[in-house]
Image (cartoon, grey):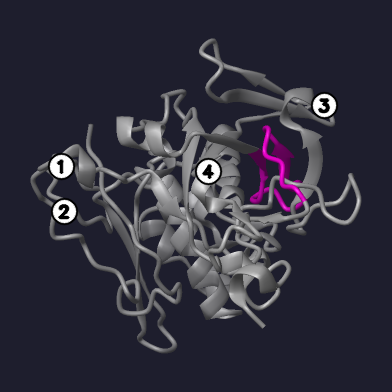
Amino acid sequence: MLMKTFESRSSDGSNGPAGWRWWASILLVFTIGCGPGEETFSETETSEEAQQLLLLNNGLSLNGLSLNGLSLNGLSTNGLSLNGLSTTSFHNWFQVNAALRAEVMKYLVECAVPVGMTRTYTAPSTGTTYTWNGVLGLAPGWSSGLAASTVELQVVSACMAAHANKYGLHVSVSLRGLDGANNVIATTSQEVTSHTLREACFFGNLFDGSTGVFGGNDGLSLSAQQSSPRVCGLPGATSTTSQCSPLVYVGSCSLYCTRDSSNTYYTSCVYNGVTYRPVTTRMKPSDIATCGNGVCEQTEKSGLPAYCSADCGS
């Protein structure tokens, strides 16, 4: 199983992702045919301890999820390749807000394109080059330059929703489910051991101009003394609102989604009569902070979501 690790970094993507580096201890071997505009990496695997590819650092701003109608950039029909990135429609879409849309592309490519491959775009108006790294490869046909299938657009949308971040705090998340070609998303034994807490399900379509994305609860609950950066699968002020608008909170995943035979992930979700390809998320139990345990943790600082004076002082 081929794995690679990412660390939290800024999302502007200019001249390659800022803050990006390969861990020196992670060596992989990839033999991947390259299509237009793709690059590959060739490294050698050493130990499973270094294999944490799928433990992706979530960090997509909620503003990124408000860009419903991403098909306007031309990628869904032209293929997620050099040809798709060189169209006038993509350039026009990108230059409206380069910083935000570079962030969206970072997570789109991370979800859709296989590990070891990149997608690069140079803005004609500024000469700035953006490079985005593939990770999960959830859309193999789209990544190869074909028009995206509906299922590929759905699972990439679900993956992007799973990376939505309310507080801007980066923690790792494990994605489970099926890709756009019905293959099981790969996991490592370390990932299965470390990310044991059932969290949420995400599904929808960010590319059709109307649907948006939905989040449901898969078992996560927080007491009044607890907090976590991972809250997009929890209800907001009421039981029918999301903490991560524009996500729509749907309640329990089990109301709409069908589990696989191993009871590990959801294979499909039906909402308002439409069937979607979802992703299921798992998190580390240690990413839940408890006020009063003597440790000042990220979500207990500066009122995110509530300041914990018992742990963080006055």
**Residue matched to label 3:** 273
What kind of residue is marked 4? Pro
Please state which of the two labelled residues, at mark 3 or mark 4, is closer to the viewer. 4
What kind of residue is marked 2? Phe
- CA–CA distance between discs 2 and 1? 7 Å
- CA–CA distance between discs 4 and 2? 33 Å
Residue 216 drawn at (x, y percent): 73, 38
What kind of residue is marked 3? Gly
Q: Tag 4 or tag 3, which sits nearer the N-term?
A: 3
**Residue matched to label 1:** 30
**Residue matched to label 4:** 285
Dot 4 alpha-carbon crowd within 10 angstroms: few under 14, some 14 to 19, many 20 or more: few
- Name the one closer to the observer, 224 or 158: 224
Dot 1 alpha-carbon crowd within 10 angstroms: few under 14, some 14 to 19, many 20 or more: some
- CA–CA distance between discs 3 and 1? 41 Å
Residue at point 46%, 41% (across, down): 174
Q: Quadrant of the C terminus?
A: bottom right
Residue 203 drawn at (x, y percent): 66, 39
239 relative position to 258: left or right: right
Q: Residue furthest top?
A: 261
Dot 3 alpha-carbon crowd within 10 angstroms: few under 14, some 14 to 19, many 20 or more: few
Q: Tag 1 or tag 2, which sits nearer the N-term?
A: 1
Please state which of the two labelled residues, at mark 4 or mark 2, is closer to the viewer. 4
Tag 2–tag 1 contact (CB < 8 Å):
yes
